[in-house]
Amino acid sequence: MTFTAMVAQPPPMPDDPGGRGEDFGKSSPVGLLVLLVFLVAVVFLARSMTKHLRRVPASFDPPAGKHEAPEKEVAPVEKPEEQKNGAS
């Protein structure tokens, strides 16, 4: 009587598994930390953006009663010759 045992084994790995080695698809604690830091940054950026957007007026059009901007008074500019003559 002859007895033959067959055992199931995974196929042998090729020399170059193409990046799909033993650790393929596993994340590390450093990756989780980076993800949490990005999440916290996004939360703070969203809060800041909301705060700034609340300060934006509903319309940038000028009010209906005012069509012209108020004129500013401009001081007269003295010429250099007048400054020399006036200082003497």
Image (cartoon, rainbow, N blue to C red):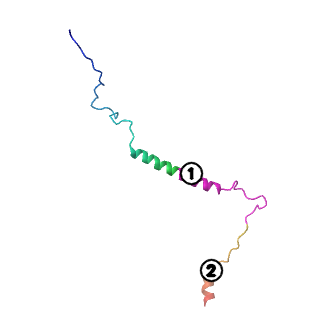
What amino acid is labelled 2 in the image? Lys
Q: Does 28 lie within the magenta span?
A: no
Residue sitting farthest toward the top: 1
Residue most extreme to the front = 1
Q: Which residues are magenta?
A: 43-69
47 magenta-colored: yes
Please provide percent x and percent y for residue 34: 43, 48
Choose between 43 and 17: the one closer to the eye: 43
- Horizontally, residue 25 falls left or right of residue 71, namely left
Q: Residue 73 occupies which quadrant of the picture? A: bottom right
Mark 2 element type:
loop
The quarter of the picture where residue 81 lies is bottom right
At mark 1, the secondary structure is helix
Towards the viewer: 27 or 45: 27
Rendering quarter of residue 77: bottom right
In the rendered structure, which amino acid carries the disc numbered 1?
Ala
Residue 46, numbered circle: 1
State how far apart marks 1 and 2 are (Cα): 55 Å
Residue 21, x across and y down, in percent: 32, 34
- Residue in the picture at 39% in, 46% down: 30
Q: Nearer the viewer, mark 1 or mark 2?
A: 1
Q: Residues within 10 Å of mark 2 (few under 14, many from 20)?
A: few
Q: Nearer the viewer, residue 41 or 76?
A: 41
Give the mark count.
2
Residue found 62% across the figure and 80% down from its top: 79
> Which residue is depicted at the point 50% across and 48% down?
39
Question: Mark 2 or mark 1, which is nearer the start of the sequence?
Answer: 1
* Mark 2, residue position: 79
